[in-house]
């Protein structure tokens, strides 16, 4: 798996794409692979304030329920509605169509502390 | 030659709703000998419930056969070994049932006055003192309805004590091998959860614990033996580290089956713990049957225990509600009384020596299976194990067969699966707990089945991946069932393959 260069990553396996002060957040290919078939996604309502490193919601697979930790702080302005009907999209396209939420970032500097694609790739190790 | 225990014989049966024919009843009433009354006119239309649409109309024998046939779809401890790790699926001795069915106990009502409940109260008091002797603790409540409820009660007691001391604190430490209910309990009790990494042995890392315990830590929740079946041998030292910083030690007693009659949590520094009567003390469980989760505490926590408390005054048992520092009730009445009766029957039928023997046999059975299966399955943690043993599917995964597939194949051999994919610190876990119930013959049958499956994985992995093959329903599509659950039956929508 090649991790997209334009994204920044956390060690908890989330990614964020910054465009201006809006960050689009998702989980990584590695995360979905470890979770297995994802059956349910629980996301916060728009307007919810989130903090970096704190729980943003959860994803449920056949195996387990896992917290999603917000990679940045700010306010949720949009959630990906298609995931409630089609959670399997998270297994198919976690870095693209299956983004989770868009956050208006209150501290864009937090991005600097996140991992670049190469560093994340090294962190999760070689995988297919 | 592998002996299969049985091919599971099950009866075909449709939904009760599909058996319904309009107007059929299971009773007959005599002719009305008073004038008929229009219920809507007499009571007001809004007080009269409409007929429930499509409510099944069937005869008595159809109902009996329906549920009896469905019961043949089950697996039960009365059919054979039930190696579900962490659940302690032991045999439920019939003497428990005999005692629980005694008329005066079976028909006792919680609203009976205390003067007519002295026998029931005596049973509760005797169970309390037996459990205190077994755990080495100072006081106990029988109220909580099961393990997770006991955990919540226990952590609320911790919070109450710390509040009384001036600061409830913020965090609960939980090892990464813990039952999932532990972090859930801490969160519901208003605490943040911090994960404590296990060391290479699979036990609590004391250096890490020392580093993490600060004045914000309310307690450590630890299961002992832990979920890989290893005794936390440094538990006394862990208790000291916590106590020095004013924090408490909570023990999840789910695995007490490995300790009863041999070691007492009260002696190794535990401040508060729960027991699972439906595991260790042989009351029936599985299928959501009632449980019992008594919480035992040291003296410092006693004032906070739930009301009412059993109290002996003037040669009579009474319920004491005047407990100003109590956290209040945690359950209606006094706990699951029927479970309390069975647990006491079990304890008294065994006596001290018998209980100790049960513990020793439980540990021996798990170690026997470990020795037999070690050549065929990887054992990631090799510390001496107690009442259960956890293998990993590493070797089989290389051939594309995972722990879940092996478990499904086990059904074809006539056994209930072991616990799959838990604890989380073992990748692809096979968690096996035979309990003391099993004879060497039954353990050998099980071991032969597991060994045979390990060989099948080598020769025909695809067949194992598609198991089970001998059951009424083949491999269920768990993913579609979770993503697109069909939860309602309607007459217009005949059952489809997906709905099955």
Image (tube, coloured by chain):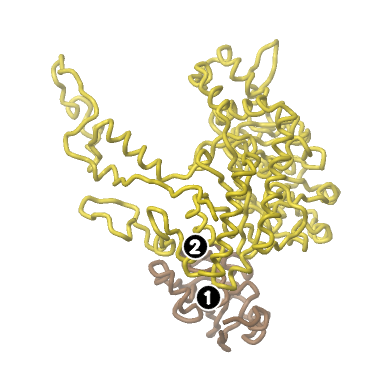
**Residue B79, placed above or below residue B41:** below
Q: Indicate the quadrant containing the C terminus of chain B: top left, top right, bottom left or bottom right.
A: bottom left
Q: Residue at x 60, y 35 (%)?
A: B282
Q: Earlier in the sequence, mark 2 or mark 1?
A: 1
Numbered disc 2: what chain?
A
Q: Residue furthest bottom?
A: A5
Which chain is tinted yellow?
B
Could you tell me if residue B437 is visible in this image? yes
* Percent position of residue B396, x then y: 59, 68
Q: Is residue A28 left or right of residue B258?
A: left
Q: Which residue is mark 2?
A: A62
Numbered disc 1: what chain?
A
* Percent position of residue B141, x then y: 66, 31
* Percent position of residue B180, x then y: 61, 54
Camera-nearest residue between A71 and B452:
B452
Q: Secondary structure at mark 1?
A: strand
Q: Indicate the quadrant containing the N terminus of chain B: top left, top right, bottom left or bottom right.
A: bottom right
Q: Which residue is mark 1?
A: A26
Q: Residue at x 48, y 76 (%)?
A: A99
């Amino acid at each position: 798996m090649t991790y997209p260069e334009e994204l920044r990553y956390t060690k908890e396996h989330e990614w964020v794409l910054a465009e201006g002060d809006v960050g689009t957040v998702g989980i990584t290919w590695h995360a979905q692979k470890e979770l297995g078939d994802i059956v349910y996604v629980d996301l916060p309502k728009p307007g919810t304030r989130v903090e970096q490193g704190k729980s943003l919601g959860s994803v449920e697979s056949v195996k387990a329920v896992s917290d999603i930790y917000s990679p940045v702080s700010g306010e949720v302005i949009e959630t990906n509605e298609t995931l409630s009907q089609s959670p399997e999209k998270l297994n198919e396209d976690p870095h693209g169509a299956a983004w989770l939420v868009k956050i208006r970032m209150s501290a864009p500097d937090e991005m600097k502390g996140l991992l670049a694609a190469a560093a994340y790739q090294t962190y999760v190790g070689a995988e297919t | 030659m592998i002996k299969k225990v049985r091919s599971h014989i099950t009866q075909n049966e449709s939904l009760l709703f599909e058996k319904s024919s309009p107007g059929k009843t299971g009773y007959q009433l005599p002719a009305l000998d008073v004038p008929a009354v229009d219920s809507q006119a007499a009571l007001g239309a809004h007080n009269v419930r409409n007929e429930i649409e499509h409510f099944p109309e069937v005869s008595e024998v159809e109902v009996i056969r329906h549920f009896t046939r469905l019961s043949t779809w089950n697996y039960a401890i009365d059919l054979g070994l039930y190696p579900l790790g962490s659940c302690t699926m032991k045999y439920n001795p019939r003497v428990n049932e005999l005692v629980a069915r005694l008329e005066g106990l079976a028909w006792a009502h919680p609203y009976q006055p205390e003067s007519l409940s002295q026998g029931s109260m005596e049973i509760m008091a005797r169970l309390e003192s037996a459990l205190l002797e077994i755990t080495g603790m100072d006081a106990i409540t029988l109220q909580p309805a099961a393990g997770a409820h006991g955990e919540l009660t226990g952590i609320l007691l911790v919070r109450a004590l710390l509040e009384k001391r001036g600061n409830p604190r913020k965090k609960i430490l939980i090892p990464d091998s813990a039952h999932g209910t532990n972090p859930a309990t801490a969160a519901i009790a208003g605490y943040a959860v911090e994960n404590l990494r296990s060391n290479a042995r699979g036990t609590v890392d004391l250096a890490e614990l020392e580093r993490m315990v600060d004045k914000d830590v309310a307690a450590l929740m630890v299961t002992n033996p832990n979920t890989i079946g290893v005794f936390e041998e440094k538990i006394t030292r862990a208790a000291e580290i916590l106590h020095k910083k004013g924090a408490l030690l909570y023990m999840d007693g789910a695995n007490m089956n490995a300790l009863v009659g041999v070691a007492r949590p009260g002696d190794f520094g535990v401040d508060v713990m729960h027991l699972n009567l439906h595991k260790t003390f042989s009351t029936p469980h599985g299928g959501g049957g009632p449980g019992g989760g008594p919480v035992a505490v040291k003296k410092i926590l006693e004032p906070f225990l739930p009301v009412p408390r059993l109290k002996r005054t003037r040669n009579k048992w009474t319920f004491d509600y005047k407990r100003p520092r109590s956290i209040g009730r945690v359950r209606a009445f006094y706990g699951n009384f029927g479970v309390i009766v069975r647990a006491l029957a079990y304890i008294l039928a065994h006596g001290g020596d018998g209980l100790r023997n049960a513990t020793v046999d439980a540990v021996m059975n798990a170690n026997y299976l470990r020795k037999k299966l070690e050549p065929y399955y990887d054992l990631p943690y090799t510390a001496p194990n107690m009442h259960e043993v956890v293998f990993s599917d590493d070797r089989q995964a290389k051939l594309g067969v995972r722990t879940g597939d092996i478990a499904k194949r086990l059904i074809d051999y006539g056994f209930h699966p072991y616990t799959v994919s838990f604890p989380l610190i073992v990748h692809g876990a096979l968690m096996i707990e035979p309990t003391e119930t099993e004879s060497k013959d039954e353990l050998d049958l099980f071991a032969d089945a597991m060994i045979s499956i390990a060989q099948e994985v080598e020769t025909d992995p695809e067949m194992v991946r598609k198991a089970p093959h001998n059951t009424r329903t083949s491999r269920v599509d768990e993913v579609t069932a979770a993503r697109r659950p069909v939860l309602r039956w309607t007459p217009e929508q005949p059952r489809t393959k997906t709905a099955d």
